[in-house]
Amino acid sequence: TVSPPVYDYIVVGGGTAGLTVASRLTEDKDVTVAVLEAGFNAEGLQEVFVPGLIGTGISFTTLNWAYATVPQTHLNGRTLTVNAGKALGGSTIINSMIFPRAEKEQYDAWGQLNNDSTWTWSALLPFFKNSELFTPPNAFQTAAGARFLASVHGFAGRVKVGFPNFFFAQSALWRRAAEGLGIPASPDLANGDPHAVGIAPNSLDAANNTRCSAACAYYTPFEGRPNLVVITNATVSRILWASGSSKGELTASGVEYLVNNQTLTASVSKEVILSAGTIGSPKVLELSGVGNSTILKAAGVTPVLDLPTVGENFADHVHSWANAFTTNNVLTKDALLLNTTFAAEQLALWFKNRTGLYSAAPRSLSIVAPSDVFTPSQLNTLIAQAEANLTHFAAEFSNGNPALAKGIAAQHNIALSLYKQNKELPLEINAEPGYSGPTAFAARPARNYTAINSVLYAPLSRGRTHIVSADPRAAPAVDPAYWAHPLDVAAQVGGIKLARKMLVAPPLDSIYAGEFEPGADKKTDADIEAWLRGVVASDNHEVGSLSMMPQSLGGVVDTSLKVYGTANVRVADASIIPFPVSAHLSSTVYMIGERAADIIRGGKV
Ligand SMILES: Cc1cc2nc3c(=O)[nH]c(=O)nc-3n(C[C@H](O)[C@H](O)[C@H](O)COP(=O)(O)OP(=O)(O)OC[C@H]3O[C@@H](n4cnc5c(N)ncnc54)[C@H](O)[C@@H]3O)c2cc1C
């Protein structure tokens, strides 16, 4: 028999954080790293590299895990889909490339929960910068409204960040409407103070207007490194433990993985780093016997280490919309669907000189504060109710684990305190220059639209994800428990009301031709709420399932990202985020990858 290859580090999942860690560790040419990625290298597909082709082709089929949730109790028993990229580069292969950051107080909450000042905004900003290669807006982009503050960006990192080459007129009208409603104009949506409205930077290479995924940033330029081995189409089924190690700290000796139907193994001399995402990483840990013993036994897995909060503390952002018909004189991206000749011309234009509608990954956005969504008395009532029911919800969300109940209570206390200071930003409201909503193309009027996406960003609800089978090919049971907390429901209803106000506020009202959805018959808050229960979707920003918190608060990893009870297994991906942040996640996940590599290299244990 041939003995399996031995690497210093094995990274499970070649996604956003996984490639970041692998790339940084292999800067030391004496260190060997293997990355095992379930998907393939999709960088050459036009639906990946052309910004305006987001979501087309095989993006949401082959390149997507498309995890199904269990029926959602608070959403009419619906089963929703949580999308997650399945390719080298992970979710950054199929994401919308919007690249802002959350408010500093939310990152500070991570430090507060862990009593560790190295996990706070000011300590983490250097790692955000390390990941970024920012291109300031050119004269055209500046004239269109793009703004930036040099002090918060990185100019020598890896992820190319810049602005698109096309801006829709209705986005500018919307920004002015939002400002008219009291939302401040943003000097930079990545400055840690995003209660504002502006044009979001994108994870794109401004020089040639192509998507810059984690593969583009952290792999392609370095793929020749002899010490970096990337194995694609390789699905990790479990971590292998050194014999006898379960008596003390568990020590990983390697991993087992599947290529087609063949089972292979690779050995590790230093560490295994789990970077399979918020749903993928707890699945691998549970398949390896680490988790809640009752859940593992029910799935047919022999427990090795009882760590009952693996897969718990799961939170996701929740997507909703209001949209209106737009006067015919306005060019919206609906034109690409309504007129295939025009679409072909626009795509040819993109290939010719990187301009036109396909050069836009369009999103002007605002992150709004409680005061934008609620009246003061409404807010006071909601906070008082949440405080009165804090223990009840902490217990309900913690799946019977007393330590995690404390952890969730601590998170709710921080969130409610920030709500009181108008600092917990409950919603992203963004303008989509064309239809966005729950109705399929064939089923809606063939018109031009303006859509306002309203996304619940600071959920108090917490759910879970767990395996139900010992078969690594079986999907886990994902229960985000959407809308399980009444403050989440109230914020999302408030978001639709604010979006409706924006649609008819000057100067956006100049192109308004009547509301389509929710629709004129949805008049009261109760009407809106009932409609939303039937349509809201995942925003694909799932976090928290292997959260970084003290064990006394139900955490799974410590502040060096090491799994409690193991000697050499770390986690680097969105699953470690203990407290949801009000932002699109990729910039934050790259930061986590940079920080993880720094911890590993610095030997902090
Ligand atoms: C449709 C969509 C739109 C989004 N839009 C935006 C946006 O506009 N801006 C933004 O900032 N964020 C956006 N996000 C969110 C953001 O992209 C993700 O939160 C982030 O990329 C997650 O990084 P990660 O490292 O945790 O996981 P991922 O990047 O998903 O990486 C996990 C990797 O592990 C692999 N994997 C899983 N299981 C296994 C296994 N058993 N063996 C081997 N490999 C495995 C996966 O295939 C994947 O490559 C979006 C996400 C989606 C899905």
Image: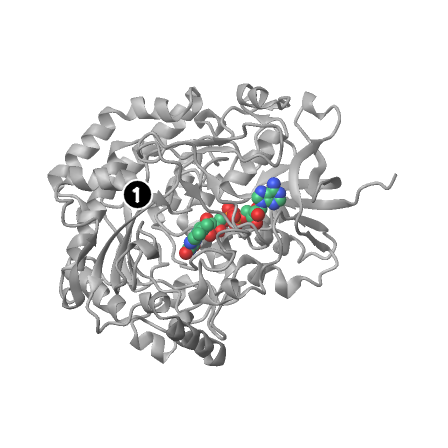
In the picture shown, does residue 315 fall above or below 97? above
**Residue 512 can be seen, yes or no:** yes
In the picture shown, does residue 337 fall above or below 92? below
The quadrant in which the N terminus is found is: top right
Q: How many marks?
A: 1
Q: Is mark 1 within 8 Å of ligand 1?
A: no
Q: Residue at x 33, y 39 (%)?
A: 459
Q: Residue at x 33, y 56 (%)?
A: 442
Q: Is residue 205 left or right of residue 394?
A: right
User: Quick one: 23 or 280, which is closer to the camera?
Assistant: 280
Residue highlighted by disc 1: 535
Which color scheme does this rendered protein use?
A: one colour
Residue at the right extreme, as displayed: 1
- Residue 35 x, y percent position in the rendering: 66, 49
Q: Is residue 460 left or right of residue 290?
A: left
**Residue 560 can be seen, yes or no:** no
- Residue 537 x, y percent position in the rendering: 35, 44
Q: Is residue 411 left or right of residue 129?
A: left
Going by the numbered disc 1, the residue's amino acid type is Val
Residue at the front extreme, as displayed: 442
Q: Residue at x 62, y 24 (%)?
A: 301
Q: What secondary structure is marked by label 1?
A: helix
In the picture shown, does residue 403 fall above or below 163? above
The quadrant in which the C terminus is found is: top right
- Residue 516 x, y percent position in the rendering: 21, 54
Residue 187 position by quadrant? bottom left
Give neighbour class at mark 1: few <14, some 14-19, many 20+ (Cα, 10 Å).
some
Residue 384 position by quadrant? top left
Q: Is residue 191 left or right of residue 16?
A: left
- Residue 312 x, y percent position in the rendering: 46, 30
